[in-house]
């Protein structure tokens, strides 16, 4: 079997992990859709190589599509025409493969499965739900890092934050401010990601005097240490299909705080973190109710040890990398 891994960006982490899992099982891989030894193709999201994919299907090569969510924010935010059309085109491209070329579909979550069915209708091909996995040795509570003893650290991990992409940061800053002012907690908000100076300045206007540590862009290899050294991960992504940062945090024994959108309720159980009602229409990006978020966060930091242990145990039972690879193999080699 020679699966091909192909996609439209944002999937590098999964691709590397899955390829390594296949290599450990002595299963060769290639990125050449025309390779004569191909018996299965794994399309990560979508690909523009439709002609090659169709030809592979004609050769009776099994095509399995891995799906997360749809592009949606461009429909509710002010979006320039070109990015708007690109987002729509990508949705239609992935939907075409889903409808006409895929022999099986692996959804990253039940939320993702229901979303695609709701927007583009049900499919007749076999489907399965497989959550993302994580290397439980690399992402582990075992390490020299420890959360601070004299204050509470909330970790926010984002990729790129510029004007118009600050929802998660704004919510995190307001959350920290409420914990400080109303719950009398000393809170450090650590923000990891690419944040420009204008966004930083805006953050300080939301909660003057708030302790914010700007971690900048860090290599993925440093994420476990950051997770171990925090008390709570605030997962700020709205309608996420299966965010890796959440799974990685729990594997490191870090409790997760989030709003009840996307697949968060599937991933974060009651004793591994807190998932609270948004309190408004998140599909329209309305402002959330932050008070319940603050109350939940207070419980997480004040009972941190118990949540940390439960988070790691849940990751061990549900998010192992080997189990994820085996699940994908069942779709590729039925």
Image (cartoon, helix red, strand yellow):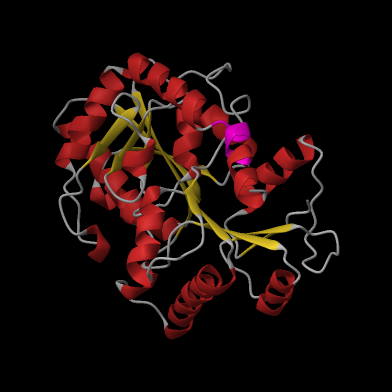
Secondary structure mostly seen in the magenta stretch = helix
Residue 303 appears in the figure? yes
Give the magenta-colored segment's residue range.
320-325
The vertical placement of 114 against 314, above or below, is below
| Nearest to the observer: residue 84 or residue 25 | 25
| Nearest to the observer: residue 146 or residue 253 | 253
Looking at the image, residue 271 sits to the left or right of residue 21; the answer is left
* Residue 117 included in the magenta stretch of the image: no
**Residue extending furthest toward the right:** 36
Residue 252 appears in the figure? no
- Numbered disc total: 0
The vertical placement of 4 against 155, above or below, is below
Residue 52 in the image: x percent, y percent? 73, 75
What residue appears at the point 57 percent right and 17 percent down from the top-left corner?
142
Residue 179 in the image: x percent, y percent? 21, 32
Residue 298 in the image: x percent, y percent? 23, 26
What residue appears at the point 41 percent right and 81 percent down from the top-left corner?
80
| Nearest to the observer: residue 267 or residue 296 | 267
Find residue 137 and report its image quarter.
Answer: top right
Residue 38 in the image: x percent, y percent? 79, 59
* Residue 321 included in the magenta stretch of the image: yes
Looking at the image, residue 54 sits to the left or right of residue 8; the answer is right
What residue appears at the point 46 percent right and 46 percent down from the top-left corner?
243
Looking at the image, residue 267 sits to the left or right of residue 21; the answer is left
What residue appears at the point 43 percent right and 62 percent down from the top-left corner?
162
């Amino acid at each position: 079997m020679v699966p091909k891994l192909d996609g439209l960006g944002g999937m590098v982490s999964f691709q590397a992990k899955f390829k390594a899992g296949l290599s450990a099982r002595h299963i060769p891989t290639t990125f050449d859709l025309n390779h004569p030894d191909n018996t299965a193709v794994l399309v990560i999201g979508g690909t523009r190589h439709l002609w090659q994919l169709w030809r592979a299907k004609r050769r009776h090569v099994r095509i399995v599509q891995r799906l997360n969510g749809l592009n949606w924010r461009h429909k509710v935010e002010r979006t320039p025409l070109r990015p708007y059309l690109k987002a729509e085109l990508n949705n239609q491209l992935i939907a075409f493969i889903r409808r006409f070329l895929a022999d099986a579909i692996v959804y990253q979550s039940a939320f993702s499965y229901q979303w695609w069915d709701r927007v583009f209708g049900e499919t007749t091909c076999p489907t399965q739900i497989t959550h993302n996995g994580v290397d439980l040795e690399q992402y582990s509570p075992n390490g020299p890092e420890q959360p601070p003893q004299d204050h509470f650290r909330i970790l926010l991990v984002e990729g790129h934050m510029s004007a118009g992409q600050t929802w998660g940061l704004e919510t995190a800053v307001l959350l920290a401010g409420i914990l400080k002012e109303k719950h009398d907690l000393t809170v450090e908000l650590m923000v990891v990601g690419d944040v420009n100076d204008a966004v930083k300045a805006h953050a300080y206007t939301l909660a003057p005097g708030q302790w914010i540590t700007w971690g900048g862009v860090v290599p993925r290899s440093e994420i476990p240490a950051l997770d171990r050294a925090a008390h709570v991960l605030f997962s700020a992504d709205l309608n996420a299909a299966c965010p890796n940062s959440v799974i990685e945090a729990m594997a490191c024994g870090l409790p997760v705080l989030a709003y009840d959108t996307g697949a968060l309720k599937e991933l974060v159980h009651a004793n591994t973190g807190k998932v609270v009602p948004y309190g408004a229409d998140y599909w329209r990006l309305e402002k959330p109710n932050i008070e319940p978020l603050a109350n939940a966060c207070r419980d997480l930091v004040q009972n941190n040890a118990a949540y940390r242990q439960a988070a790691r145990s849940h990751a061990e039972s549900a998010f192992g990398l080997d189990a994820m690879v085996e699940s994908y193999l069942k779709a590729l080699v039925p």
